[in-house]
Each structure stands twice: as structure tokens, then as C-alpha cells.
């Protein structure tokens, strides 16, 4: 089993406080706050990092599936929009929109979309987010 580490530290009351998010690899460390999370202020937020994780995981899963089927991609670019919704007892991640574009020589559009749907359903981050609606738009580009 592979184990990954991330850390968060929060100081102060929720609206005026400040926090730091840090990846165990040291590749990222950054501030977050109430404003960066709920009001568009500077800094990062957990949902943005979740979106980056999901986009990265999905892109790698799609690349693996395409490569194993004999159609290695030359490029995959994925964005993730994480929708945070206010609910009576707080907030929840209501949905994630994955939008991917890929350049894959010699592949039919229908096969690409089927493979992208499978990658969406089976990448580890999608599986971890089973209670969240995940929507996918997949476009095959010609180079």
C-alpha cells in the first residue's frame, strides 16, 4: 500500500484566522483563509487542491488506459471545477466538472469518449469521491 502525507495548520477564529496547507513531498506549501475559500481572496483552498488532485489522477488514468490499448496520447489537458455548495449544516462539494482535451493519433472519437468515461469512473480520486456528482466533457483534438 502506498501512503501519501499532507498537512494543514489553522490559527485563530474561522473568519479572521489563517492556515497553511503543505504537501508531504515539499512540492507545495501555501496559505489559506476564510476569504480564499469562500470569498475569492488570495491563497489556496482545499477545494482547489481537490480539483488539482482529481484532474491529475484522471489524466494519468486516461493516459494509462489509452497507452494499454495501443494509443499512447501525446497530450492530455484536464481542468476540474469543484462546486462548493452551502447546505443547512455547512458546506459540501456538490459536483466536479472535469473538462479534458487530448491529442491521440489514430483514435476514433467514440473510443476516446468511452475510454475517458471509464477513466472517470475508475481513477482513485473519483472512487474516493463516490458521493459527489462527477461530470465529464471529453474532446479529442487533432494535431
Image: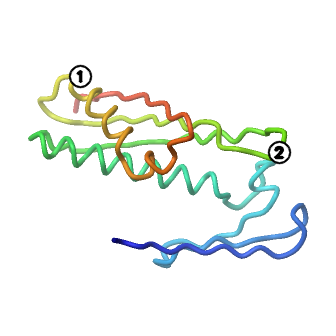
Q: Give how far across and how far down residue 57 sits, in percent.
A: 39, 52
**In this rendering, would 117 be left or right of 115?**
right
Quadrant in which the C terminus is drawn:
top left
The 10 Å Cα crowd at callout 2, few under 14, some 14 to 19, many 20 or more, is: few
Q: Quadrant of residue 29?
A: bottom right
Q: Which residue is mark 1?
A: 109
Q: Which residue is mark 2?
A: 89
Viewer-nearest residue: 43 or 14 = 14
The 10 Å Cα crowd at callout 1, few under 14, some 14 to 19, many 20 or more, is: some
Say which label, 1 or 2, has the lower sequence index. 2
Q: Give how far across and how far down residue 11 sits, in percent.
A: 82, 76
Q: State the scheme by which the image is colored.
A: rainbow
Q: Give how far across and how far down residue 8 sits, in percent.
A: 66, 73
Q: Residue furthest left?
A: 70
Distance between mark 1 and mark 2 Cα atoms? 43 Å
Tag 2 secondary structure: loop
Viewer-nearest residue: 116 or 123 = 123
Q: Which residue is located at x 19 percent, y 41 percent?
A: 66
Q: Give how far across and how far down residue 19 sits, in percent.
A: 75, 71
Q: Which residue is located at x 27 percent, y 27 percent?
A: 114
Quadrant in which the N terminus is drawn:
bottom left
Viewer-nearest residue: 32 or 13 = 13
**In this rendering, would 121 be left or right of 130?**
left
**In this rendering, would 68 be left or right of 125?**
left
Q: Quadrant of residue 20?
A: bottom right
Q: Which residue is located at x 80 percent, y 70 percent?
A: 18
Q: Which mark is residue 43?
A: none
Amino acid at each position: 500500500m502506498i501512503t501519501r502525507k499532507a498537512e494543514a495548520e489553522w490559527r485563530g477564529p474561522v473568519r479572521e484566522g489563517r492556515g497553511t496547507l503543505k504537501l508531504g513531498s515539499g512540492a507545495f506549501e501555501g496559505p489559506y483563509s476564510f476569504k480564499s475559500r469562500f470569498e475569492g481572496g488570495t491563497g489556496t483552498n482545499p477545494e482547489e487542491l481537490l480539483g488539482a488532485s482529481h484532474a491529475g489522477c484522471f489524466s494519468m488514468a486516461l493516459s494509462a488506459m489509452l497507452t494499454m490499448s495501443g494509443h499512447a496520447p501525446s497530450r492530455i489537458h484536464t481542468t476540474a471545477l469543484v462546486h462548493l455548495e452551502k447546505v443547512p449544516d455547512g458546506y459540501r462539494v456538490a459536483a466536479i466538472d472535469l473538462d479534458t482535451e487530448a491529442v491521440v493519433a489514430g483514435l476514433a472519437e467514440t473510443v476516446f469518449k468511452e475510454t475517458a468515461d471509464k477513466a472517470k469512473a475508475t481513477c482513485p480520486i473519483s472512487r474516493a469521491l463516490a458521493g459527489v456528482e462527477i461530470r465529464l466533457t471529453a474532446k479529442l483534438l487533432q494535431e
